[in-house]
Image (spheres, helix red, strand yellow):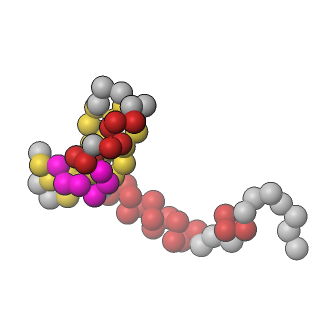
Amino acid sequence: MLYTVIPLERIYVDQRAEDKKTIDETDAEYKDLVLKHGRVVTRRDGDNYVVQRINSTDMRDYLNEEYSPGKIIKH
């Protein structure tokens, strides 16, 4: 029996699956698009970039459809 504040999901994790996940994530090529108040993180997919996430202090950036996750940005 464990008495801990750490969630059991973190204690009983399959390390092999975590290692594979880390390797798969590092194979992707990422690029940041700089905004006036933050940035948009994109992942390369062929000749295009796909929006992964947005980090901004301006709420209007989150409402911009061009920056929504999954949106393709031609480069």
Q: Is residue 27 visible?
A: yes
In the image, the segment drawn in magenta is: 68-73
4 sits to left or right of 43? right
Q: Is residue 29 visible?
A: no
Closest to the observer, 39 or 16: 39
Image point (22%, 46%), residue name: 66
SS majority, magenta: loop
In the image, residue 14 sits, relative to residue 28, either above or below, namely: below
For the point 30% across and 26% down, which residue is it?
36
Residue 35 position within the rendered picture, expressed as x and y whole percent measured from the top left: 29, 31
Q: Quadrant of the N terminus?
A: bottom right
Splitting the image into 4 quarters, where does residue 22 fall?
A: bottom left
Viewer-nearest residue: 46 or 40: 40
Q: Quadrant of the C terminus?
A: top left
- Residue at 32% from the left image edge and 44% from the top image edge: 63
Magenta stretch: includes residue 70: yes
Q: Residue 28 at what x, y percent from top left? A: 30, 56
Q: Nearer the viewer, residue 55 or 47?
A: 55
